[in-house]
């Protein structure tokens, strides 16, 4: 697992956010050009940008065009470069020792080289922005089939293990989680948009395993899910010094399927 600099390089490569050395706060020139007008005017987030005359695509002559989202949105297209610059700005400020509670939208916008309206167009408040920052720093959620039972459950247990490793290897990520838990609104946002969907996906995998005859059908599915997830959470959260070997997910599943009672003596 790479250190903090390695993590930021990985994030930029994953999201296509190449940086220009001449842009403020590590921001790309493209992101700065996109929102220079907003920064100077201080236009509120709810006011859509005006379309300059003589430009059918909404850009002025010589200005770099923004990259639209895959799904059309009303109003101005979103810029991947601007989003990358904003996320990187938050990470840079946190790495410099700024606490989550002390970060303001104004400070983030200044560091990213964008206007406040550019941030508010994407995130209505700091909590949603910080949750996306944490998501960006964590390993990606792995794809699952959505049709398998134990196979999908194993993939998700392995994802829990790798996220535990990521928190152990990144002092910054560990520090962010510690701060999040002391800010109820931020923690509730993270729990509702990240943790709860992951838990639901695992419960659905348990249901598929029960339907396929891979697990008992006389137990509550949420209890079964807790039995699988519990040992991994104990290792990753409550016992930070406990080993997280590559085969831990398989060992947990095997132990539960075989049971803990000793083999019957002949």
Image (spheres, helix red, strand yellow):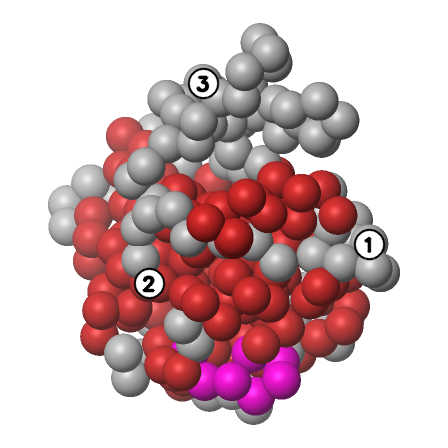
Residue 124 shown in magenta: no
Residue at 62% x, 58% y is 113
Q: Earlier in the sequence, mark 1 or mark 3?
A: 1
Left or right: 226 as drawn, with respect to 54: left
Question: Disc 2 to disc 3, how far (Cα)?
Answer: 25 Å
In the picture, the quarter occupied by the C terminus is bottom left
Residue 33 position (above or below residue 186): above
Q: Give the residues in magenta.
A: 94-100
Mark 3: which secondary structure? loop
Coordinates of residue 81 in the picture (x, y in percent): 65, 43
**For the residues carrying marks 1 and 2, which lies nearer the camera in this image?**
1
Q: Earlier in the sequence, mark 1 or mark 2?
A: 1
Nearest to the observer: residue 233 or residue 89: 89
Confirm or deny contact between disc 1 and disc 3 (CB under 8 A).
no
Which picture quadrant has residue 224? bottom left
Mark 2: which secondary structure? helix
Q: Is residue 18 visible?
A: yes
Question: Disc 1 to disc 2, how far (Cα)?
Answer: 28 Å
Residue farthest toward the right in the current orientation of the protein: 21
Which picture quadrant has residue 232? bottom left
Residue at 52% x, 52% y is 40
Which picture quadrant has residue 16? top right
Q: Which residue bears the numbered disc 2?
A: 127
Bin the neighbour count of mark 1 within 10 Å (Cα to Cα): few under 14, some 14-19, many 20 and up.
some
Residue 161 position (above or below residue 148): below
Bin the neighbour count of mark 3 within 10 Å (Cα to Cα): few under 14, some 14-19, many 20 and up.
few
Coordinates of residue 155 in the picture (x, y in percent): 53, 47
Nearest to the observer: residue 75 or residue 99: 75
Q: Which residue bears the numbered disc 3?
A: 72
In the picture, the quarter occupied by the N terminus is bottom right
Residue at 32% x, 37% y is 47
């Amino acid at each position: 697992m790479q250190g903090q600099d390695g993590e930021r390089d990985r994030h930029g490569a994953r999201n296509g956010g190449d940086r220009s050395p001449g842009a403020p706060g590590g921001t790309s020139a493209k992101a700065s050009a996109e929102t220079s007008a907003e920064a100077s005017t201080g236009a509120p987030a709810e006011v859509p940008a005006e379309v300059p005359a003589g430009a059918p695509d909404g850009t002025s002559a010589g200005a770099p065009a923004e990259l639209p989202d895959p799904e059309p949105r009303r109003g101005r297209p979103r810029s991947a470069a601007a989003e990358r610059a904003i996320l990187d700005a938050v990470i840079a400020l946190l790495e410099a020792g700024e606490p989550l509670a002390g970060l303001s939208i104004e400070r983030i916008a200044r560091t990213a080289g964008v206007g406040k309206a550019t941030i508010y167009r994407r995130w209505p408040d700091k909590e949603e922005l910080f949750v996306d920052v944490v998501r960006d720093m964590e390993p990606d959620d792995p794809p699952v089939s959505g049709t398998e039972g134990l196979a999908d459950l194993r993939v998700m247990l392995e994802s829990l293990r790798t996220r535990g490793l990521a928190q152990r290897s990144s002092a910054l990520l560990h520090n962010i989680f510690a701060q999040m838990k002391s800010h109820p609104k931020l923690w509730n946002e993270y729990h509702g948009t990240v943790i709860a969907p992951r838990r639901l996906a695992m419960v659905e995998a348990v249901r598929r395993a029960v339907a396929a005859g891979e697990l008992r059908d006389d137990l509550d599915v949420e209890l079964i899910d807790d039995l699988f997830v519990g040992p991994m959470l104990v290792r990753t959260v409550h016992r930070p010094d406990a080993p997280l070997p590559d085969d831990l997910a398989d060992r947990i599943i095997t132990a539960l399927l075989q049971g803990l009672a000793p083999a019957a003596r002949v």
